[in-house]
Image (cartoon, helix red, strand yellow):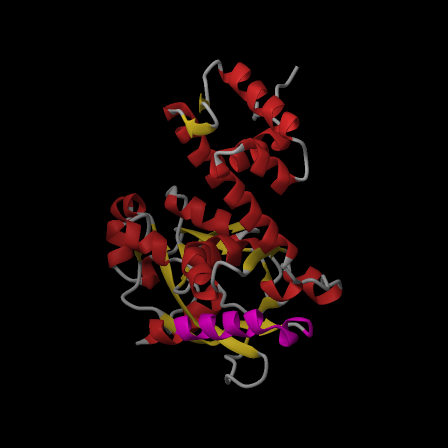
Amino acid sequence: MIRSRYRLPSTSSLTAFEAAARHLNFSRAAQELHTSQSAISRHIAGLEQRLNVLLFLRRRKRLALTEQGEHLYRAVVSGLDNIQSAFAMVSAWSPEHELTIACTHEISHLYLLPRFEELQAHMGQDVRIRILTSEYEALEFSPDPRIDLAFAYGKPSDGQGASRSVFQEAVCPVCSPQFAIDHADRLEAGVGAWAGLPLLLLTKQNRGWATWEDWFARVGVPDPSAAYTGIDNYVYLLEACTAGRGIALGWKGLIERHIDSGALQLCWPEFIHMDQGLNAYLTTAGQTKQPAWACLEYLHEQAQSALM
C-alpha cells in the first residue's frame, strides 16, 4: 500500500489554529471563520493531542502561544501564504502568460535547454515556457494550434515580419581529443589525406543544412572517399563523435558546450560560413501574444551578440 507523501491535519484545523494564534482569542477566531468557539477549541485540542504538546498557555482569560505553538504558527502562516499566492497566480493565469515553443529534439537539447534559465529570466517568472519537440515535417503538415514559436532552416531572416535569424550556419569538422591523437598524422596532413577516415553523416531528411559535400566544395577539396557512418539524429551523432567513432560536421550554434568542455575539438582551422541558417518564426497564434514577440527578439539579440 502506497502511503500519502503528506501526513497533515485537515485544512480546517490549520486555519482554526492560525486564526486563534493570530488573535490569541478563540471567540474572535470563531467569528472570523464563521463557526463556534467550541469548534475552534476542538480543532486546537485535536492538534495538541496529535502532536502531544501544548500549543497555548491558558492564563485566566488570556492566551499565549507556547514555544512549540510559536514554531508551528510561523510554519502554518508561511504554508498558507504560499498556497494563497499560488491560487491567486493560477486563477489569474491566461494564455497570454504561456509561451509554447516547438522545435526538433536537436534544437531543444543543443540550443534551447542550455539557454533556458537565461530565457526564463528574460521573459519573467510569470511567463510559463513550454517546449514541444517535434520533427519539421510534423510542424508543417499538422501544426499544434497551441504553438507560438517554431524554428526552420532557410535564408537568414532580414528581421522583418514575424521571423528572425537565430544563427547563420557556420560549420567545421570536429572530433574527440583521443580521435585527434590516434589520427594525428592524417589530420595534420590536410583533408586530402582523410581517405578512409570515418565521417559521421546525418541521414535524416535535409531541410537546408550543410552537408559534407557542401563543406568539401567550400574548402576546395574533392571528397576524399571517406568511410561514412550514417546517424539519423544530430544529438546521437555528436555522442558518437565524442565517443571517438569518427569526425562530425559541427554547427557553430550547436556545439559550443562540447568545444568549451573539451569533449570535442576542431579538425580545421576555422568555421566555414554557409548561405543558410536557423530562423525562429511566430505562428499565427504567436503573433497575437506579447511574450512570443519578446522571445523572438531575445533569440535574435542573442544571435547578434554572438557575432560580435
Is residue 150 in the magenta section?
no
Which residue is depicted at the point 48% across and 34% down?
24
Q: Which residues are magenta?
A: 284-303
The residue located at (42%, 28%) in the rendering is 65
At horizontal 49% and vertical 17% (from top left) the residue drawn is 51
Which residue is nearer to you in this view: 109 or 218? Answer: 109
Above/below status of 256 relative to 153: above
Is residue 53 placed above or below 251 in the rendered structure?
above
Q: Is residue 72 left or right of residue 98?
A: left
Q: Is residue 153 visible?
A: no
Q: Is residue 141 left or right of residue 61?
A: right
- Residue 294 in the magenta stretch? The answer is yes
Does residue 123 sit above or below 265 in this rendering? below
Q: 31 and 234: which one is in front? A: 31
Q: Is residue 25 visible?
A: yes
**Which of the two residues, 199 or 262, is positioned nearer the viewer here?**
262
